[in-house]
Amino acid sequence: MRIKRLYQITRTFLHYGLNELIPAKWMPWSVRFARCTLFWIRNKHTDLPPGVRLRLALESLGPVWIKFGQMLSTRRDLLPPDIALELAKLQDKVKPFSGERAQQLIEASLGLTSIHDAFDEFSVTPLASASIAQVHTARLKSDDNDGADVVIKVIRPDIRKAIDADLRLMETLAAVLAKHLPDGRRLKPREVVREYQKTLLDELDLAREAANAIQLRRNFEDSPLLYIPEVYSDYSRHNVMVMERIDGIPVSDIDTLMAMGVDMKKLAERGVEVFFTQVFRDSFFHADMHPGNIFVSRKNPKEPQYLGIDFGIVGTLNREDKRYLAENFLAFFNRDYRKVAELHVDSGWVPAHINVEDFESAIRTVCEPIFNKPLADISFGHVLVNLFNTARRFEMEVQPQLVLLQKTLLYVEGLGRTLYPQLDLWQTAKPFLERWMKEQLGWRAVVRSVREQAPYWAEKMPEMPSLLYDYLQTHKHQVTRQELAAQAMLQVQSTLAWRLWWGLASAGGLISTTLLWVTDQNHWLTLTGAIVTVTSIMMSWRKPAQTR
Ligand SMILES: Nc1ncnc2c1ncn2[C@@H]1O[C@H](COP(=O)(O)OP(=O)(O)OP(=O)(O)O)[C@@H](O)[C@H]1O
């Protein structure tokens, strides 16, 4: 089975001439030989540009490869821009599976005898169908949940087996590439595949998606900016998720938004605000913000509110990452490249042995041309891409959380500029970042930190006297132990010195006595020499007096 799939993948790659994308000088003889043995599989698409060939090949290989291509399209640090752009067009439109089968899966998963035990209505025709899951509309029973309109997301049957098999093959291919490509170390194919696997397997777990949705909904409770539909946890499992049905206008439907009189400037700015709030206030951000997952509420066009769905991929940042990121943005827009370089070292993103002057100069070379444009045209996302690409030359490790953030920022920016082309992202974001920095570093931060720590100290206070007593007691014993050790050492030292001197005297005495005796000199003198030698030997055996 695995061999068959491997052959299928190889055939597709060769049909689309993907082997020709690897420069001949990089191709090891073993791969060239393997290519020759498959002489009957020809490149059938020589007329198409490489990016298009790669996209079509991935599309024909199915969901795992399509989603992999979608992920690669956001890794502009790894791919040339034309290929990245082409991969961004990958669509996972797939045939829906039967609605009856979906109904059976829901019944089995929720332990229902009939779907109507939990739902008054269930639409067998799917509302949407994607590579991993399918969505059906339904209505909850009126006596349970006020008969709320919901959607039921169901994972495709048997998808897990197919995904596991393809992921294993992908791992093998990545290992071959890492070994044989001269650029394999920099491109890190094994790490890229591993990161992708994690994202994909997370997306297969709807219990995880439900938890993400609940957290985001709590973070934006009563927010005029973003509404997250309610998840019905009682009806959600690992392969089924039931969620409030939303009725909004797709954010890509600009004509309808305009016709409804939506304030487009405000809508674009609110998108940026939602993103920065998620990143800097909550450290928890929706990381799959493509236009298909964002809608606009019909309720108040002058105060437009976003509606979000699809919470399979979320990103988190720790306090340090957030601070360094905010400082980086501020330093960058103040053109303080030295600070940008230092921040990368301080945060540990690049190793400490890097020469900061060289790094600063590399950042300047990349970033100065960006400032030739008006501020409103500068792309935050591309600033980050450029910055991280430069940093990678200075041994910056790939940081998955920052890659997700950079990808989301590119989406948010693209979306904002589609809605309102004059959107000045920096003007929208700067006050937000400055306020956040002030809160983190100013006196308010100290007060907050004290307030945050107060319960801890209140809890530990009663233990303080006994802890202090224990400390002093240990300290006292420690001092005594140290004194004894020092004394013992001094004693050893003086014994050694004593023995050295008397040893030297014995040796001298012995040599002189022997010479006197051999040369038959004065007997009295020889006898005196012998007495001095024996006395010295005896003295060197004796222990010296105790040192204090
Ligand atoms: N709460 C909801 N209310 C209304 N429609 C919804 C809701 N959730 C999902 N849908 C519809 O179902 C479609 C697919 O949903 P979702 O994006 O969650 O699935 P997916 O399998 O993760 O798709 P993809 O990965 O391609 O974005 C959405 O584009 C939307 O049209």
Image: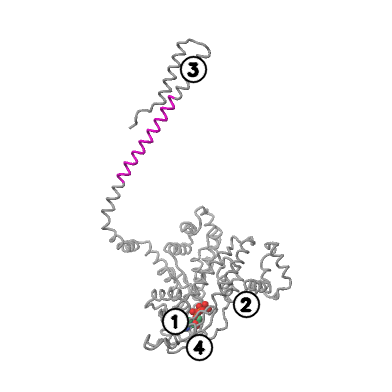
Label 1 residue SS: helix
The kind of secondary structure element at disc 4 is loop
Precedes in sequence: disc 3 or disc 4: 4
Predominant secondary structure in magenta? Answer: helix
Question: Do we see residue 291 in this rendering?
Answer: no
Single out the mark in the foreground, 2 or 1.
1
What amino acid type is highlighted by mark number 3? Ser
Residue linked to disc 4:
124
Location of mark 2 (residue): 60
Most foreground residue, 61 or 434? 61
Sequence-first tag of 2 and 1:
2
Where is residue 435? Give x, y as percent. 39, 67
Which quarter of the figure is the C terminus placed in? top left
Q: Give the numbered dot on residue 512.
A: 3
Image: 546 above or below 66: above
- Pointer 2 residue Cβ closer than 8 Å to ligand 1: no
Look at the image and give the residue range highlighted in magenta.
Answer: 475-502
Alpha-carbon distance for marks 3 and 4? 116 Å
Q: Dot 1: within a 10 Å radius of its alpha carbon, few (fewer than 14), some, or many (20 or more) residues?
A: some
Of the residues under marks 2 and 4, which one precedes in the sequence? 2
Taking the spot 33% from the left edge, 44% from the top edge, the residue there is: 478
- The x, y position of residue 438, in whole percent, is 38, 64
Q: Give the CA separation, mark 2 to mark 1.
A: 34 Å
Figure check: 123 above or below 472: below
Q: Is residue 122 above or below residue 67?
A: below
- Which corner quadrant holds the N terminus? bottom right
- Residue 161, quarter of picture: bottom right
Q: CA distance from mark 1 to mark 3?
A: 106 Å
Residue type at the position of mark 1 = Leu
In magenta segment, residue 458: no
- Measure how far apart labels 2 and 4 are at the Cα level: 28 Å
Tag nearer the camera, 2 or 4? 4
